[in-house]
Image (cartoon, rainbow, N blue to C red):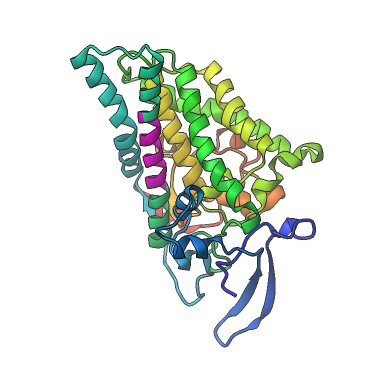
C-alpha cells in the first residue's frame, strides 16, 4: 500500500479508525524505514480518473493534490543541503497582484462611469466579482505551495510524507473550504462600511493591516492555547490535530465549533481593536488566507510572514513555516500557538525552538 492512501494523528488511533500511526517494519540494506499505517484514502483515485466527470466537491478537491512524491518519506540518501531562504518580497508581490486587481477595477468603475454601488443588485454583483477573484487567489496560493513543496522539499520529509484527508472526512473538508471563502468575504462586506465608495488605501494601510493581524493573533492565541491546555476544551480543536504533516487544505480540517470561532468570532474581535476600510479588510483577508495555507504546507525553507516577518525578526517574534509545522508534529503537547506571528508565544513563554539549524545560517545577510 502506498503512503498516499491515508491519514490522521497517531495520538487519536485508539479512538478514531481514521487516525494515523507509524510502525517499524525492519531495516533495508541502506537505512531503517518505517511503515505508515493510515486510514483508508481512495477519493484521490476517483478525482484523478474522472477528470471530465467531476462533481463540484471533486473539482475543488483536485486542487488539494500535489505531486505524489510529497506523500512519501524521502530516501535518507537524498540530501537537499542547507535550508534555503525565501525572499518575502516575492510573496508580497504574489499576494498584492491578486488582492489589488478588484480594488483597482472598482476604483476605475466609480471614477470613470459614475455608477453607484447602492442597490441590492449592484452589491450582489460586486460581491460575486470579489468572490470569484478571491477563489482564484486561493487556488493559486495552493498551487504555489505545491510548487515550492516540490522544489524545496518539506520539513521532516525523511521520516514522513505529507498527509492526505481520509475518505471519512473528505467531503466535510472540501465543503468547508467553499463555505470558508463565502463566510470570510461576507465578513469583509459587512464590516467594510465604505464598500460602495472608491477603495481607500494609504501609506498607513500596511501598518494597519499588520496591526490587525497581530490583534487577530492575540485572540486566536488565547483561544488556541486554551483548547490545548484544558481537557474540557480539547474537543473544539481535536479534529484539526488529526494530522501530523498537514497540507494547505488541511488548515480547514476542523469541527464546526472551531470553524465558528476562527471564521467569525476571532476576526470580529480583531476588527473591534483595529478598524479597517473595506479595501484594507479585503487585503487583510488575502494575507490571512495565504499565511494559514502556507503555515500548513511544511515547505522546507526559512519562509517568513510576508508582511510581519521582517518587522518582527529583530525581536525573535517572526513567524516561519516551520513554527506551525512543529506545532502539528507534536500534537496536543506542541507549543507555537500563534498563527500570524510569534509575538504572543514569545511574550507568554510558549515559543518552541526550531529544529532546522540550517535556517539561521542560510538566512544571514538576507
Question: Residue at the front extreme?
Answer: 53
Per the rendered image, the range of residues in magenta is 129-141
Q: Is residue 236 left or right of residue 51?
A: right
Foreground residue among 111 and 46: 46
Task: Report the residue at 56% width, 49% height from top.
Answer: 250
Q: Which residue is rendered at x = 43% and y = 64% of the image?
A: 67
The residue most toward the bottom is: 29
Most foreground residue, 286 or 321: 286
Pinpoint residue 151: horizontal percent, then vertical percent.
Answer: 38, 61
Q: Would you identify the image quadrant in which residue 30 lies?
A: bottom right
Q: Position of residue 366 (x, y in %)?
A: 34, 47
Q: Is residue 339 magenta?
A: no
Q: Is residue 316 visible?
A: no
> Which residue is drawn at the image coordinates 37% and 41% (left, top)?
136
Q: Position of residue 259 (x, y in %)?
A: 62, 36
Residue 26 picture quarter:
bottom right
In front: 57, or 242?
Answer: 57
Which quadrant of the rendered structure holds the N terminus? bottom right
Q: Is residue 297 at all visible to an observer of this figure? A: yes
Amino acid at each position: 500500500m502506498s503512503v498516499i492512501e491515508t491519514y490522521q494523528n497517531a495520538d487519536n488511533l485508539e479512538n478514531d479508525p481514521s487516525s494515523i500511526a507509524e510502525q517499524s517494519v525492519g531495516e533495508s540494506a541502506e537505512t531503517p524505514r518505517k511503515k505508515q499505517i493510515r486510514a483508508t484514502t481512495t477519493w484521490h483515485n476517483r478525482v484523478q480518473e474522472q477528470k471530465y466527470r467531476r462533481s463540484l466537491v471533486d473539482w475543488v478537491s483536485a486542487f488539494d493534490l500535489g505531486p505524489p512524491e510529497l506523500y512519501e518519506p524521502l530516501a535518507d540518501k537524498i540530501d537537499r543541503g542547507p535550508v534555503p531562504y525565501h525572499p518575502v518580497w516575492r510573496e508580497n508581490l504574489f499576494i498584492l497582484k491578486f488582492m489589488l486587481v478588484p480594488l483597482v477595477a472598482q476604483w476605475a468603475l466609480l471614477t470613470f462611469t459614475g455608477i453607484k454601488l447602492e442597490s441590492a443588485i449592484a452589491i450582489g454583483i460586486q460581491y460575486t466579482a470579489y468572490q470569484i477573484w478571491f477563489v482564484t487567489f486561493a487556488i493559486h496560493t495552493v498551487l504555489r505551495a505545491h510548487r515550492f513543496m516540490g522544489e524545496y522539499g518539506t520539513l521532516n520529509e525523511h521520516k514522513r510524507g505529507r498527509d492526505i484527508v481520509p475518505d471519512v472526512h473528505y467531503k466535510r473538508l472540501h465543503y468547508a473550504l467553499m463555505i470558508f471563502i463565502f463566510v470570510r468575504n461576507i465578513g469583509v462586506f459587512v464590516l467594510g462600511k465604505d464598500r460602495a465608495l472608491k477603495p481607500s488605501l494609504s501609506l498607513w494601510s500596511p501598518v494597519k493591516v499588520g496591526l490587525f493581524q497581530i490583534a487577530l493573533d492575540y485572540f486566536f492565541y488565547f483561544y488556541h492555547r486554551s483548547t490545548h491546555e484544558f481537557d474540557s476544551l480539547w474537543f473544539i480543536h481535536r479534529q484539526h490535530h488529526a494530522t501530523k504533516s498537514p497540507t494547505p487544505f488541511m488548515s480547514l480540517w476542523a469541527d464546526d465549533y472551531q470553524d465558528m470561532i476562527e471564521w467569525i468570532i476571532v476576526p470580529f474581535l480583531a476588527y473591534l481593536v483595529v478598524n479597517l476600510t473595506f479595501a484594507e479588510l479585503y487585503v487583510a483577508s488575502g494575507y490571512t488566507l495565504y499565511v494559514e495555507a502556507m503555515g500548513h504546507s511544511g515547505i522546507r525553507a526559512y519562509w517568513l510572514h510576508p508582511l510581519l516577518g521582517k518587522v518582527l525578526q529583530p525581536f525573535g517574534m517572526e513567524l516561519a513555516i516551520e513554527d506551525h509545522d512543529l506545532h502539528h508534529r507534536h500534537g496536543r503537547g506542541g507549543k507555537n500557538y500563534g498563527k500570524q506571528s510569534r509575538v504572543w508565544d514569545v511574550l507568554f513563554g510558549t515559543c518552541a525552538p526550531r529544529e532546522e539549524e540550517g535556517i539561521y545560517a542560510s538566512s544571514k545577510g538576507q
